[in-house]
Image (cartoon, rainbow, N blue to C red):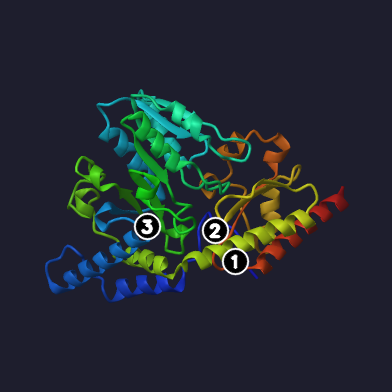
C-alpha cells in the first residue's frame, strides 16, 4: 500500500483533470489560432477554461497568463518587474526562505548590480512585517514574498507588504509565489494587493507542465513579452497554447472541493502531528504550518535521508525538504537557526485531498518502529 505524504512536491492527477486532458488531446485538438471551425472550437474551449481558472483565482481572465510551471512564472515575474521599473531604481526586497525559482533570478540580478535585501524568518519561519516595511526604499523596484512557504507551510505577510508599499509610496511591484497557497488558503490577488501572482497546476491535482502568472490589469500595458512570436497569451507569451494541460487545470479547479477539502486536509495533518508527538520520542515539530497541508518535523540525530529511505521501504513517501533541491541542504531550514542535529533529521510531511487518518497512523507507526530498531542496534 502506498502512503503518499509529499503533496507539496507534486500531487496525483485527479480523474477529472485526466479526462479533460484526454478529451482535448483526442477530440478538441485544434490549434486555437486556426481560422477554421475546429480551431474555433479549440479557442472557445480555451476561453472557457481560462475563465474557470481566473474565477478560481479571483481575477479577470485577461489578467491570467498561462505558463509551463511555477518556476517559469516566478522567473517571468522577477525579471519582468525589474524591467518594468528599470528607470526607478535597483533595489529588491525578498526573503531568505523563498523558492529557488525566486532566489536564483534575484541572485543573477544582484550580480548585474542590483542591491538585494533578504529578510530572515523567526524560529518558526515567519517574516516580520515591520522589518519588511523598514526595508523599503525610494529605489525599491520589486518586493517578492511567497504566500505559503513550501517547506514549512507558514503564511507570510503579503498583504502587509502591499500596505507598506502604498504607505511609503515606493515604486515597487509586489510579487507573491502562491504555488503552495493556491486552493489551500483563501486569497485573491487584489485582496492581497499583489501586482503579480504565480500558481502551478501540479500542486493542485493537474498535470505537470502547466502554471499561470497573474498580472494586475493596470500593469499589463507596460509589461514586456516573455516570448515574442505569434502573439498568444495577449502577446506576452507566444507559443501555441497547451490546451490539454489548461483544460486539465480548469477541471482540477472545479474538482477541488473548496472549504470542505481544506478542512479534511487540515484534520489529517493535525491528527498526524498528534500521533507523531505521542509515538515518536524526542520528535520536534519545527513548524505545524499555518497552511492546512504542510508541516515540518525533526528527529534529531537521525539523518533525514536515512529516514526518507527507510520510510520509502515501508511504502511511505515524505521528503527531507523541497524536491527541487534534492540532495542539498535546505536553505529554508538553515535560515531558522536550527542546531546541526535538528537540521540533520528534518522531514517535510504534506497532505492532500486523498490523505487519510490511516495514512497518518502509518507514518507515526513507521517512524516509531524505525526509532525502536535503531535503538536496538545501538
| Measured Cα–Cα span from mark 2 to mark 3 | 20 Å
Tag 2 near tag 1, CB within 8 Å? yes
Q: Which residue is mark 3?
A: 57
Please name the residue shown 20% across and 46% down the image: 228
Q: Is residue 170 left or right of residue 252?
A: left
Q: Which residue is mark 2?
A: 7
Q: Nearer the viewer, mark 3 or mark 1?
A: 3
As displayed, is residue 18 above or below residue 186?
A: below
| Measured Cα–Cα span from mark 2 to mark 1 | 9 Å
Residue 256 percent coordinates (x, y): 46, 67
Q: Which residue is mark 1?
A: 355
Frontmost residue, 168 versus 67:
168
Frontmost residue, 138 versus 8:
138
As displayed, is residue 9 above or below residue 168?
A: below
Mark 2 / mark 3, whichever is N-terminal: 2
Asked which secondary structure carries label 1, the reply is loop
Please name the residue shown 43% across and 39% down the image: 102
| Measured Cα–Cα span from mark 3 to mark 1 | 24 Å
Tag 3 near tag 1, CB within 8 Å? no
Asked which secondary structure carries label 3, the reply is helix
Residue 378 percent coordinates (x, y): 87, 47
Please name the residue shown 36% across and 44% down the image: 194
Q: Is residue 245 left or right of residue 267?
A: left
Mark 2 / mark 1, whichever is N-terminal: 2
Mark 1 crowdedness (10 Å alpha carbons): few <14, some 14-19, many ≥20: many
Q: Is residue 232 left or right of residue 303?
A: left
Residue 353 percent coordinates (x, y): 54, 66
As displayed, is residue 296 above or below residue 241?
A: above
Quadrant hosting residue 145: top left
Mark 2 crowdedness (10 Å alpha carbons): few <14, some 14-19, many ≥20: many
Quadrant hosting residue 42: bottom left
Amino acid at each position: 500500500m502506498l502512503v503518499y505524504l509529499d503533496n507539496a512536491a507534486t500531487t496525483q492527477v485527479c480523474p477529472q483533470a485526466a479526462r479533460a486532458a484526454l478529451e482535448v488531446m483526442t477530440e478538441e485538438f485544434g490549434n486555437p489560432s486556426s481560422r477554421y471551425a475546429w480551431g474555433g472550437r479549440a479557442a472557445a474551449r480555451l476561453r472557457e477554461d481560462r475563465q474557470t481558472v481566473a474565477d478560481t483565482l479571483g481575477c479577470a481572465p485577461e489578467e491570467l497568463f498561462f505558463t509551463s510551471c511555477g518556476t517559469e512564472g516566478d522567473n517571468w515575474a522577477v525579471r519582468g518587474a525589474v524591467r518594468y521599473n528599470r528607470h526607478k531604481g535597483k533595489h529588491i526586497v525578498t526573503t531568505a526562505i523563498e523558492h529557488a525559482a525566486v532566489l536564483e533570478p534575484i541572485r543573477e540580478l544582484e550580480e548585474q548590480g542590483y542591491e538585494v535585501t533578504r529578510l530572515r524568518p523567526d524560529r518558526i519561519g515567519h517574516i516580520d512585517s515591520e522589518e519588511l516595511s523598514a526595508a523599503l526604499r525610494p529605489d525599491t523596484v520589486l518586493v517578492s514574498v511567497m504566500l505559503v512557504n513550501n517547506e514549512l507551510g507558514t503564511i507570510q505577510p503579503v498583504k502587509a507588504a502591499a500596505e507598506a508599499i502604498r504607505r511609503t509610496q515606493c515604486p515597487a511591484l509586489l510579487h507573491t509565489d502562491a504555488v503552495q497557497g493556491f486552493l489551500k488558503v483563501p486569497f485573491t490577488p487584489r485582496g492581497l494587493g499583489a501586482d503579480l501572482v504565480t500558481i502551478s497546476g501540479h500542486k493542485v491535482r493537474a498535470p505537470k507542465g502547466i502554471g499561470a502568472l497573474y498580472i494586475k490589469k493596470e500593469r499589463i500595458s507596460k509589461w514586456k513579452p516573455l516570448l515574442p512570436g505569434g502573439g498568444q497569451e495577449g502577446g506576452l507569451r507566444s507559443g501555441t497554447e497547451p490546451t490539454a494541460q489548461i483544460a486539465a487545470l480548469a477541471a482540477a479547479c472545479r474538482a477541488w472541493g473548496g472549504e470542505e477539502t481544506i478542512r479534511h486536509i487540515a484534520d489529517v495533518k493535525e491528527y498526524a502531528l498528534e500521533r507523531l508527538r505521542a509515538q515518536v520520542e524526542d520528535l520536534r515539530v519545527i513548524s505545524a504550518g499555518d497552511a492546512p497541508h504542510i508541516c515540518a518535523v525533526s528527529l534529531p540525530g537521525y539523518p533525514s535521508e536515512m529516514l526518507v529511505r527507510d520510510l520509502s521501504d515501508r511504502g511511505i513517501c515524505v521528503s527531507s525538504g523541497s524536491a527541487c533541491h534534492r540532495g542539498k541542504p535546505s536553505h529554508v531550514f538553515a535560515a531558522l537557526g536550527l542546531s546541526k542535529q535538528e537540521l540533520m533529521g528534518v522531514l517535510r510531511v504534506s497532505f492532500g485531498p486523498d490523505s487519510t487518518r490511516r495514512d497518518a497512523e502509518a507514518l507515526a507507526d513507521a517512524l516509531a518502529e524505525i526509532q525502536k530498531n535503531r535503538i536496538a542496534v545501538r
